[in-house]
Image (cartoon, grey):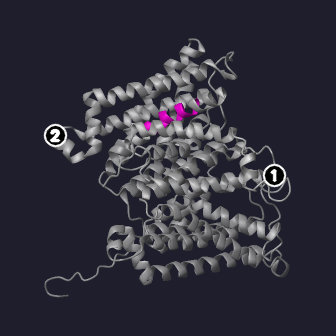
Amino acid sequence: MIQILIDSLIRAAELALLGVGLTMVYDVLRFPSFAHVEFGTVGAFIALTISLALPFGPGSSLVIAGIVAMVAVGFLGVATDRAVFSRLRGNSPILLLIASFGVGIVLRFGAQAIWGANAQSYPLPLMRPWLIGDGRLTPSAAAIIVVALVTMLLFHFVLNRTTLGIAMRATADNKDLAEASGIFTERVIRLVWFVGAALAALGGVMLGVATQLHTNMGFEIMLPVFAAVILGGIGNPYGAVLGALVVGFAENIGLAINWGSLASALGLATEDFLFIPVGYKAAIPFTLVIIMLLLRPTGLLGEKRA
Amino acid sequence: MSAFLVYLITMTGIYGIMSLSLSLQYGQTGLVNLGQVGFFMVGAYVSAIGSTILGWPIALAFVAGVLGGALFGVLMALPIGNLRQDYWAIVTIAAAELVRVIFLNTNLGSPYVGASYGITGIPSPLQGVLGGPYYGYYYLALVAACLLGCYLVVQWVSRSPFGRVLKAIRESDEVAQALGKNVRAARIWTMAIGGAIAGLGGALFSHFLGFIDPTYFMPLETFLVWAMVILGGAGNHLGALAGAIIIQLLYNGTRFIGFGEEYASLGASLRMVLIGVLIILVILYLPRGILPERRRRYGVRDAAGR
């Protein structure tokens, strides 16, 4: 049982880091960016290159490399906004969405051209996991959960207690009104891109620490991230965190449940043990999204917008 | 060389059918279907399963593929019929991935059929009568006939009163609703017609290659079809065909730029970067495509009454 809790929290940490930026960009610019997860891929690979070049131990090298990658990808996010999205302000969200699809392709295959199509991994040493009940927690897994938790608390503080956060929320709420109140909304939008892309890069590094690095890693986690964001209510950062927890637990619990007794009670199957095969794991977040859209399209914490 | 040319033209024809389908969905109705490859896969698999495992006549398998695509379109549209287009984008891309995940993990009949093994020995139509060195030309004629048929169907739908409802929905679903049109039903019908056309494309694809597996149906295919429609000019079906020809030329023509054996994967990545950049440039500088839609104006007269 504790193992499921640990696995779910790791998954939720990755999803939350990638989802918060996505939902922020949506909140301010009103389109779902299909390029967002690719910032995670690029960030993970930049961190790999830097950490291999640094002379320190593998752990501290990765910490420094991760921070540098976050800043670099943050600027990359601002650059894509300047180059593409800022020229499309005021256009229909559909056009922006398709442009983001194109940007995502460029980022993903650009990364593949630079770092190759083979899977790689961070040079972290093998560490003995701590035993907690029947669960095993490796130090790197613990680090992922702690990093995500601290980042989310920081983010909450920035959003609520700083002028920057208030300007961000004002711009998201009503851009014209924010502008009239003396907020330079273009600067806020640039900051949203910076913070969102940097958080995505952090999410990408965490994803790489948990498993491996691959140029498809961003695309593969895109649908669960969107599922988390929609579940929580698209445009709401707290909703994205809540959605990440729901998706993280649903994926792991869904695979761990023995559906045999339920299936035989319904007369569908006669096996005593019936588990969802791991290959179908990708179907779980999607099913959640469909149910959510049918019942409450605005998400758990979403409010209806004009 | 001429065999390769025939292959290339046949594939261009199949992609032309796909882009006509998307042209109806996005160009005419404004539906952001990022799961276009899902239709293609359903059509290809249903037709392949019908003609190999179930032993149906090929004509029946084709019809089943077309109906399968239409049914998938309806299923995809049902939960999201009333929602905004950003939700469409996410749900359709997820639905296509779900189809791929299911086919990737499900054996069909025996242990080495279906799943990642794919389906082999898919028969070609009329091989007994027309088989021989010129069979490629006959199949090309079949694809061309289907392409022409699809073009006529799409044009006919667009010119009909129903087509004008679709255009009204594209411009503003609220206006269409205010005029008493059933927006949800019209969207579902569009997905059914678009799905049927793309399903036909999939059936033609599987019987052309004789072998399919899930790697042929990656989300990248959807992106290529989108590139065709955007480049050609959304809303102009002839433009969709022009886009299909250009993107196919670009995609296959760049194969011959010598990168050498060891850089083959680099070449493949750069090719996708190129197409991504092209799409972004078209959206930025030529948003209506190379063959823009001819917009009819109703009841606009100048002061002289002309």
Q: Is residue A15 magenta?
A: yes
For image coordinates 35% across by 48% down, the residue present is A303
User: Which residue type carries mark 1?
Assistant: Thr
Q: Chain of mark 2?
A: A
Along the line of sight, the residue nearer the viewer: B62 or B139:
B62
Q: How would you rate the neighbour count of disc 1 (Cα within 10 Å): few for under 14, some for 14-19, many for 20 or more?
A: few
Q: Is residue B157 magenta?
A: no
Q: Chain of mark 1?
A: A
Can the viewer see residue B218 in this picture? Answer: no
Residue identified by numbered label 1: A270
User: Which residue type carries mark 2?
Assistant: Ser
For image coordinates 69% across by 40% down, the residue present is A257
Q: Earlier in the sequence, mark 2 or mark 1?
A: 2
For image coordinates 51% across by 61% down, the residue present is B79
The image quarter containing residue B136 is bottom right
| Percent position of residue A120, x then y | 65, 30
Q: Does residue A83 sit above or below B36 in this rendering?
A: above
| Percent position of residue A93, x then y | 37, 55
The residue furthest top is A56
Q: Which residues are magenta?
A: A10-20
Q: Does residue B134 sit above or below B262 in this rendering?
A: below
- Disc 2 vs disc 1: which is toward the camera? 1
Q: Secondary structure at mark 2?
A: loop
The image quarter containing residue B42 is bottom right
| Percent position of residue B247, x then y | 54, 61
| Percent position of residue A30, x then y | 36, 49
Residue identified by numbered label 2: A181
Q: Main secondary structure of the magenta part?
A: helix
In the picture, which quadrant includes the C terminus of chain B? Answer: bottom left
Q: CA distance from mark 2 to mark 1?
A: 66 Å
